Image (cartoon, rainbow, N blue to C red):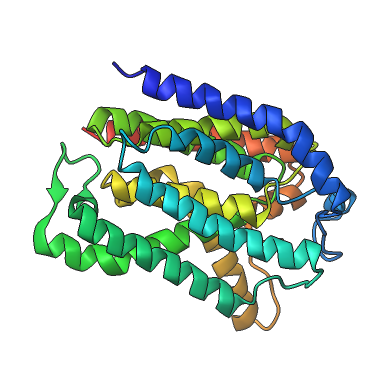
Amino acid sequence: MIINKDVMIPLFTAFMISVVLSPFVIPFLQRLKVGQTEREEGVKSHLKKAGTPTMGGLIILISLTVTSLFYIGRFPRLVPVLFLVLGFGIIGFLDDYLKVVLRRSDGLYPRQKMLGQIIVTTIFVVYIWNMDASCLEFLIPFSGGEVISGDLARMVAIPLAYVAIIGTVNGVNFTDGLDGLATGVTTMVAVFFTVASLVLGGGIEPLTAAVAGALLGFLLFNVYPAKVFMGDTGSLALGGFVAGAAYVLRMPLFILIVGLIYLVEVLSVMIQVTYFKKTGGKRFFKMAPIHHHFELCGWSETRIVTVFTVITAFLCLLALVGLN
């Protein structure tokens, strides 16, 4: 049965924690004056968002962590996924804290942030290698259930993990640029992984459902016009969730399908930077990441969020077909 108590209870629990926490955490963040800063050279309509509380990812992290702790005893596979969520969430929290509390404009230096991400990814890989090496196998989409396993899978899985995990984490981070965008897109991905875990017997459905519930509760306050932003605290943690769930379910290749929006966001930045350098200052997009390009083309924030979320929903349906 697709819907069961190990899905519905964590879904509603995390949702209620998120909804109840938000009215307390948001004023607390306002009192700490941890407001969003907007660049003068950015989208002009975003200047009015300056001062909106950020670091709201704490609401998501608390909601899904508290909920998941009730299930770890029966679902040990939650451990490595929850570790990635919290590991990257801590990196994001440190970055946010330095930027908005200590007023260090750059937050963590790029080298520090990358080193942290490599350390967290390495611990995750070592854990699954020793505790459940089947997580280093690959389910091939649309293959009828074919799996790449054995020594070949392990040889590929280790280096790929650094690309897939760190790439996904930063992809979600780039996607978090409009009210409700990363929240809406990742909710669809969390629902997909919940269904996939049930179908495949993956044993992580309480956590994936908790993520969906926490995000739905947070979305009530993050939808346009946002009362709170998740910050790097939330976006890096969610990237860790997507990558961790994919690996534990042996589905890293499926990230290319359900996480296409994340990939496009990253590629748009890479294309913009490369084109700018090669052409001596010309721009390929009006602005990157690509959601800002659509804004400058006249699309409203709500339209972009709706389109990107609907696209992700259809991609998740396509990925479900690819399980067979």
Say whether residue 87 is left or right of residue 135: right
Give the quadrant of the N terminus: top left
- Picture coordinates of residue 265 (x, y %)? 56, 56
The quadrant in which residue 271 appears is bottom right
Q: Residue at x 31, y 43 (%)?
A: 77
Residue lying at 63% horizontally and 54% vertically, measured from the top left: 233
On the image, which quarter does residue 39 sit in?
bottom right
The tally of labels here is 0
- Is 298 situated left or right of 290 in this image? right
Name the foreground residue: 290 vs 85: 85
Q: Is residue 116 left or right of residue 302?
A: left
Q: Image quadrant for the C terminus? A: top left
- Left or right for 69, reference 61: left
Q: Residue at x 40, y 52 (%)?
A: 243
Q: Is residue 264 visible?
A: no
Q: Is residue 81 above or below residue 128?
A: above
The answer to whether residue 167 is visible is yes
Picture coordinates of residue 284 (x, y %)? 63, 66
Residue at the spot 59% in from the left edge and 41% down from the top edge? 62
Image location (x, y in percent) of residue 163:
39, 66
Whether residue 178 is situated above or below residue 280 in the rendered picture: above
Image position of 64 with respect to 147: above or below: above
Percent from the top left, x then y, of residue 139? 21, 46
